[in-house]
Image: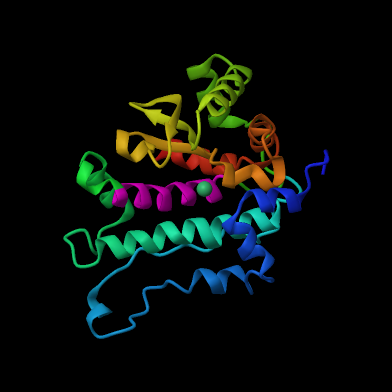
Amino acid sequence: MKDSYTKRDALQALGAGAAFVAAGSLFGTLPAFAAEKSTTPTSKEDKTMTTITLPPLPYASNALEPHIGKQTVEIHHGKHQKAYVDKTNELIKGTDLEGKSLEEIIKASAKDSSKAVLFNNAAQAWNHIVYWDNMKANGGGKPSGDVLAKIEADFGSYDKFVEEFKANGLTQFGSGWVWLVLDNGKLKITKTANADNPVAHGQVAVLGVDVWEHAYYLDYQNRRVDYLSTFLDHLVNWDYAAKAIKG
Ligand code: MN
């Protein structure tokens, strides 16, 4: 740790999460854990129903170290994201949204204030899929090829993109997300509060970074800007961005 604020302090600050962590070993292997909520029917009634599933991480839980620690990744994926998935399934059960995709559920609930809880959980379930998939070990740095050309065309330069991305991530007050989106064919940076996301605004998510404190507090404490810099310099999966831009 760079300062006297230890991981133990951070865990204590996180409250309920700390109690969970203190209880001992969190999980066996993540893929097995991820499979806990599967489409496997548990009763006759469930056989025709498709549930939303928690995808396994696209890499080992320690793959992003030293930038994002194994413990952060395991709690974030296995506890936070799993809770959003479970709550979404609970809320759609027996409704006309049961069996729909996450994107359909997000669009159907985005503008309906009576479905705010469903929107928050479905959007967060989706947002974290983007988040894990748009990172990789030994990622980051300036992209090349078509992605760089598109960034330069729409932002002027890669440095301008970096500046705007970090500024948006840093100024999102409280919990939320910073996104690189494709909006009517043009790359733009947006920030959203809480669960709000590009799907709700008819945009394509090219990159998405979680700026809720649970995403970075164990590794960066209050230093959100360091977390954002690290994402861009060491973690971005530009292949993911390239695919998203191509559609
Ligand atoms: Mn999160």
Residue at 60% across, 54% down: 15
Q: Is residue 9 left or right of residue 47?
A: right
User: Which color mode does the image show?
Assistant: rainbow
Q: Quadrant of residue 73?
A: bottom right
If the image is split into quadrants, where does the C terminus sit?
A: top left
Which x, y percent locates residue 218?
68, 48
Q: Quadrant of residue 40?
A: bottom left
Q: Is residue 131 magenta?
A: yes
**Residue closer to the observer: 243 or 170:** 170
Q: Is residue 24 magenta?
A: no
Which x, y percent locates residue 17?
59, 58
Residue at 64% across, 74% down: 28
Relative height, residue 134 to residue 54 (above, below): above
Which x, y percent locates residue 208?
50, 39
**Residue closer to the observer: 233 or 85:** 85
Relative height, residue 165 to residue 64 (above, below): above
Residue at 65% across, 63% down: 21
Residue at 65% across, 44% down: 217
Prevailing secondary structure class for the magenta stretch in the rendered image: helix
Relative height, residue 77 to residue 106 (above, below): below
If the image is split into quadrants, where does the N terminus sit?
A: top right
Relative height, residue 111 to residue 73 (above, below): above
What is the residue that sits farthest to the left in this orientation?
Answer: 96
Q: Is residue 174 left or right of residue 29?
A: left
Which x, y percent locates residue 77?
55, 58
**Residue closer to the observer: 174 or 184:** 174
Q: Which residues are magenta?
A: 117-134
Query: Is residue 232 visible in this depiction of the protein?
Result: no
